[in-house]
Image (tube, rainbow, N blue to C red):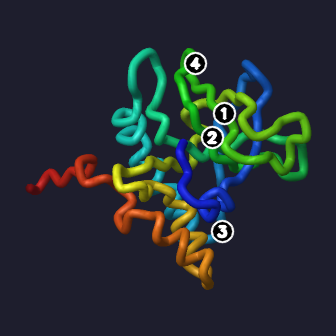
Amino acid sequence: MLIRGAALALLICCGSLPARAEVPVIHVQSSDYAMAKAFGQARATLNDALGAMEKRHGRFSPSFALKVALPVPAPERIEMIWVDTIRRDGKGFVAQLAGHPAHMPDKRIRDLVRFSHSQIADWAVQAVDGRYYGYYTTRVLLNGAKGPLAEEIRALLVPNPLPPEWRFNPSE
């Protein structure tokens, strides 16, 4: 995914997954209501994002990224990380790490990881003007953030996280 500005790159979390591992459904629980709501909103719009961004042969647009929950050794149990260069792999996905993992010493940025649909926690896509849709969890992190870096990141986000053409109101 093309990232404009180092500010957005600072928000990328990290993780990895052993190749071809059978991974159970991972439930992310948060005692933070706003973050739990962001996870819910991202998951509720995920299939729209996947459908809009999937191109030919199971590959996805290069402007598309996913935040996935990947298993790591205890005590962390999971690591949330952004991935990009995504493609379908059987019933799951394979992608490149978009950041440096904090809890997986055998993985580095750009290494491949495999994950299932149930492990996806958030999504992001770059708009034509260079700003970003999605990033539901990043928007929550920015709520209490102050200073020039926070303002720079806010400026990179489209105010409504869902692209207009994906919005549907059955009452209209």
The x and y percentages for residue 162 are: 35, 55
The x and y percentages for residue 75 are: 89, 51
Labelled pair 3, 1 in contact (Cβ < 8 Å) = no
Question: How many numbered marks have been drawn onto this rendered protein structure?
Answer: 4
Among the two numbered marks 4 and 2 on one chain, the one whose residue lies closer to the N terminus: 2
The x and y percentages for residue 1 are: 54, 42
Closer to viewer: mark 4 or mark 1 = 1
Left or right of 11? Residue 105 is: right
Say which amino acid is labelled 1: Gln
Image: 113 above or below 13: above
The x and y percentages for residue 11 are: 65, 60
According to the image, label 1 marks what residue?
A: 96
Q: Secondary structure at mark 3?
A: loop
According to the image, label 4 marks what residue?
A: 89
Outermost bottom residue: 146
According to the image, label 3 marks what residue?
A: 31
The disc placed on residue 168 is: none
